[in-house]
Image (spheres, rainbow, N blue to C red):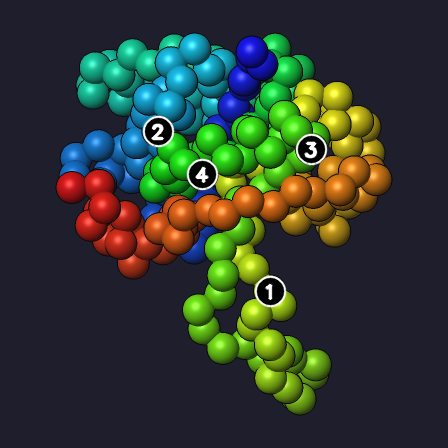
């Protein structure tokens, strides 16, 4: 049986939320977003190794919150870097798993089916990401011109993105560049194909106040 590590990325400041408090620490029903996210993975597999990336200046705030909310899920905290790439690279040095998952700390609505499907596909194929269809119409913009495109040809990519250990370590031997949008894109650039699985539609990344309200409906 493969040992699983999950890196929860929560080293961002979240400027789009228009708040001095990073979004991972904001409350939904009187509990921080990040705790809901961590609980999802712990409930899926209590033996899963959890690595959390945080801004160094917020380490003590997180420790205070854990005490305040009597939160005891085992995990290791790693200092986040300037870019998401740097945060993941720091966390990879601590991971012991044969399969390494990377998940946004502000996606608390991921469900067991999505986690399970991604891990299984990574075990079989080496790299896997969850996706969901696009419901809205799309237009491609080029300067002041635009044209309709077939939304059926596109998907929204979610997390967790899961990889065999050697696959993601090889990918992170590449230097950082602005074209890196997520871990799967970096793995793809290293020459490894990405398997896709069905995600769960409600598994949004919380970036705005509206997203917080949406998540609150599911986390009652």
For marks 3 and 1 on the same chain, the one whose residue lies earlier in the sequence: 3
Q: Disc 2 designates what residue?
A: 40
Q: Nearer the viewer, mark 3 or mark 2?
A: 3
Mark identifier at residue 113: none
Image point 56% across, 72% down: which residue? Answer: 151
Q: Foreground: 17 or 156?
A: 156
In terms of secondary structure, where does tag 3 sit? helix
Mark 2 or mark 3, which is nearer the start of the sequence? 2
**Tag 3 and tag 2, C-beta contact below 8 Å:** no
The residue under label 3 is 125
- Upstream in sequence: badge 2 or badge 1: 2
Q: Is residue 141 visible?
A: yes
Q: Tell me residue 67's x, y (percent).
A: 24, 14
What residue sits right under mark 1 in the picture? 154
Mark 4: give few (<14), some (14-19) or many (20+) Cα within 10 Å: many
On the image, the x and y values in percent for residue 54 come to 48, 27
Residue 70's image quarter? top left
Residue 176, position in %: x, y? 76, 39
> Quick one: SS at disc 2?
helix
In the rendered image of this protein, does residue 21 appear above or below residue 87? below
Camera-nearest residue between 217 and 210: 217
- Residue 197's place in the image compared with 137, above or below, is above
Instruction: Check disc 4 and report the residue beneath it.
Output: 114
Mark 4 falls on what kind of element? helix
């Amino acid at each position: 049986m493969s040992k699983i590590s999950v890196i929860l990325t929560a080293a961002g400041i979240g400027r789009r939320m228009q708040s001095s408090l990073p979004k991972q620490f904001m409350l939904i029903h009187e509990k921080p977003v990040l705790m809901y996210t961590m609980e999802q993975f712990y409930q899926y597999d209590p033996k899963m190794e959890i690595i959390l990336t945080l801004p160094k200046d917020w380490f003590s705030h997180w420790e205070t919150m854990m005490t305040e909310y009597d939160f005891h899920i085992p995990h290791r905290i790693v200092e986040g870097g300037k870019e998401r790439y740097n945060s993941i690279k720091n966390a990879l040095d601590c991971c012991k798993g044969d399969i390494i998952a990377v998940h946004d700390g502000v996606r608390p609505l991921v469900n067991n089916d999505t986690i399970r499907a991604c891990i299984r596909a990574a075990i079989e194929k080496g790299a896997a990401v969850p996706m969901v269809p696009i419901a809205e119409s799309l237009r491609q913009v080029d300067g002041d011109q635009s044209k309709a495109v077939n939304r059926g040809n596109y998907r929204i990519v979610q997390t967790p993105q899961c990889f065999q250990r050697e696959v993601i370590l090889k990918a992170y031997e590449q230097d950082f560049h602005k074209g890196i949008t997520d871990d799967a894109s970096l793995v793809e650039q290293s020459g490894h194909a990405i398997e896709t699985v069905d995600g769960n539609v409600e598994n949004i990344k919380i970036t705005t106040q509206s997203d917080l309200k949406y998540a609150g409906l599911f986390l009652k």
